[in-house]
Image: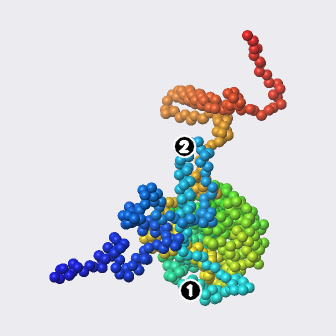
């Protein structure tokens, strides 16, 4: 009897299994409510995100439908062709945002194979553009903003008022550190999680500024002029009085790079694993951190290099000079790739935006000029009250300028002229030395004479981050995996150019280049032959060696003449029909003394 009762009472797990197998077996309202959570709402745009997970096949729908609902065979075939859940239409503005430009004209190609390949490629590009615009729904976070009531200006709103209005987590991001070994240089990691401080008097500290967990704190007992994080938060480099030193996250010295002598500024290229340095003697060096070798190093011949920034778009290094010129450098070229006269006076500070499209510079004339690096043309110009000693551009286009003990911030001032400052902040730690925006946070870090300040700037950081690229919440295992992938996908230093897409083009030598190369053969001398006899002590060997040497020289000369004769027919260019003429020589005054070609007598039959 007990066994029969147990068999009659179904368990909860059996009910749940039946519920997922057959939609009609739903007994309790609690289970129905839970099941509704898994059903996508058809009134929302997000219904396409779950269409592949919950949609049934067409055969299952046919079996579940009654026979009265079915129509003729033609309608069934049309229903099979139509998808069950069609994706919603994408707005034209979003498509323009993710567009990759105009497509290639397929009709301009004659070959059917190329037409088919290009058509398939264009379909893939269009599909990726639509998916990128459609998946923008997943970006649930929105950027912050600061609004004033009535006629009140946002520049007059203080940090105390902002802290009272935000939540507790955001309020903890505002803090100040009173330190005695300044002035201080600062640097954030690429994911915006860790902070590095370096005082001029030797104080170096690294910590997680979100959780306020200290990683290391040391005193190197000599001047620290600049410092940078490397590919992970486990290593950082400092430019000290004589050389560049590399430390780990516990403050242990790992390397001393003596090839970099008396360095003033450092920049790290994460995709190339290159540490770039600028010295007070005008030298520019690139060190490959993954291998430990110097890739390139040469003299710029432009004086003391005190201002340096990197372009994240193409990996070039921008240098500011006392003449007001900004130069772009690559490790493969000993001359600057481009020169821009950004200021009329000496450059005092400069910065590039994270996208690598624009560069901001300020000179002694108190003018902040913003230039488009790609088009090499000016965009905006602003006049400030003092000479900014440091500039920084955020991910959302917010510009910060540190002048004395005051920091002024301008929002959306790159492409559109700004009427006035968005926010102002007076630093309590005396003179401002460096300002830098924290990635993926509405935070601005300020390194000053007597410490460090972290202030809130609503709307400055990017709210949505790519976890495969920069993940602030990654674990130790994820960090190790990302480091290995970055080493495997390392970009060679040879690809650092102004146009990073030039590698996708086909390098076809023109006809003029071919002709010039063939012309050079006419002016080449035959190669020299160095002949050393085997036996030098033999009597009469000198005469025989001279004869052998003469024979070898004559053979080399004959081979060279054959090579010239072989390439000489290619020097003839067809001109007008099948006639072939040699390259025309420049006219001369003595051409009238040349013998004219005789005309052949034509005999009429």
Label 2, secondary structure: give it: helix
Circle 1 crowding by C-alpha within 10 Å: few under 14, some 14–19, many from 20: few
Q: Position of residue 255 (x, y in %)?
A: 51, 68
* Residue 475, placed above or below residue 59: below
Label 1, secondary structure: give it: loop
* Residue 379, placed above or below residue 454: above
Q: Quadrant of residue 72?
A: bottom left
Q: Nearer the viewer, mark 1 or mark 2?
A: 2
* Residue 334 circle label: none
Is 73 positioned to the left or the right of 436 in the image? Answer: left
Is 143 positioned to the left or the right of 469 in the image? Answer: right
Report the residue marked by disc 2: 112
Q: Report the Cα–Cα distance between label 1 and label 2.
A: 62 Å
Report the residue marked by disc 1: 167
Work out whether residue 155 can be spotted. Answer: yes
Is 145 positioned to the left or the right of 46 in the image? Answer: right
């Amino acid at each position: 009897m007990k066994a029969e009762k147990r068999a009659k009472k179904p368990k909860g797990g059996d009910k749940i299994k039946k519920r997922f197998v057959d939609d009609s077996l739903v007994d309790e309202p609690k289970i129905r409510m839970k099941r509704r959570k898994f059903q996508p709402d058809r009134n929302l745009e997000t219904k396409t995100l779950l269409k592949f997970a919950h949609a049934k096949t067409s055969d299952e729908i046919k079996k579940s439908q009654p026979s009265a609902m079915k129509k003729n065979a033609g309608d069934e075939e049309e229903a099979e062709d139509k998808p069950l859940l069609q994706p919603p239409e994408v707005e034209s503005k979003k498509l323009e945002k993710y567009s990759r430009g105009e497509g290639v004209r397929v009709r301009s190609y004659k070959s059917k194979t190329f037409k088919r390949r290009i058509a398939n490629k264009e379909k893939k590009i269009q599909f990726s553009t639509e998916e990128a615009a459609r998946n923008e729904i997943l970006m649930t976070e929105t950027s912050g903003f600061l609004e004033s009531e009535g006629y009140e200006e946002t520049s007059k709103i203080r940090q105390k008022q902002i802290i009272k209005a935000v939540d507790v987590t955001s309020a903890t991001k505002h803090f100040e550190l009173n330190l005695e070994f300044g002035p201080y240089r600062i640097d954030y990691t690429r994911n915006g999680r860790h902070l590095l401080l370096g005082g001029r008097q030797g104080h170096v500290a690294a910590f997680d500024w979100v959780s306020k967990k200290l990683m290391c704190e040391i005193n190197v007992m000599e001047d620290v002029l600049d410092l940078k994080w490397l590919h992970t938060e486990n290593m950082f480099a400092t430019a000290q009085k004589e050389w560049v030193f590399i430390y780990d996250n516990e403050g242990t010295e790992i390397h001393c790079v003596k090839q970099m002598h008396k360095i003033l500024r450092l920049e790290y290229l994460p995709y190339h694993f290159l540490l770039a340095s600028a010295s007070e003697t005008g030298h520019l060096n690139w060190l490959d951190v993954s291998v430990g070798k110097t890739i390139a190093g040469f003299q710029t011949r432009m004086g003391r290099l005190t201002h340096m920034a990197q372009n994240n778009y193409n990996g070039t290094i921008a240098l500011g000079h006392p003449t007001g010129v900004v130069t772009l450098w690559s490790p493969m070229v000993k001359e600057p790739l481009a020169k821009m006269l950004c200021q009329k006076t000496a450059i005092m500070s400069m910065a590039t935006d994270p996208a690598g499209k624009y560069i901001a510079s300020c000179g002694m004339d108190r003018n902040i000029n913003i230039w488009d690096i790609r088009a090499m043309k000016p965009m905006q110009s602003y006049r400030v009250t003092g000479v900014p000693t440091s500039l920084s551009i955020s991910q959302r286009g917010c510009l910060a300028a540190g002048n004395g003990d005051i920091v002024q911030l301008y929002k959306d001032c790159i492409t559109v002229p700004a009427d006035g400052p968005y926010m102002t902040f007076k630093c309590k730690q005396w003179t401002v030395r460096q300002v830098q925006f924290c990635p993926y946070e509405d935070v601005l870090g300020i390194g000053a004479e007597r410490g460090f300040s972290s202030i809130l700037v609503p709307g400055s950081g990017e709210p949505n981050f790519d976890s495969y690229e920069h993940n602030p919440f990654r674990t130790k295992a994820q960090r190790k995996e990302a480091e290995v992938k970055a080493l495997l996908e390392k970009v060679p230093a040879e690809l650092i150019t102004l146009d990073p897409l030039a590698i996708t083009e086909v390098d076809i030598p023109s006809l003029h280049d071919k002709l010039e190369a063939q012309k050079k053969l006419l002016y080449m001398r035959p190669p020299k032959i160095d002949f050393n006899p085997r036996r030098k002590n033999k009597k009469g060997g000198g005469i025989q060696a001279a004869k052998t040497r003469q024979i070898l020289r004559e053979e080399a000369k004959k081979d060279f003449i054959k090579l010239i004769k072989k390439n000489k027919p290619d020097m003839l260019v067809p001109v007008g029909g099948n006639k072939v003429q040699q390259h025309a020589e420049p006219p001369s005054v003595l051409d009238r003394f040349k013998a004219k070609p005789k005309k052949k007598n034509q005999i009429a039959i």
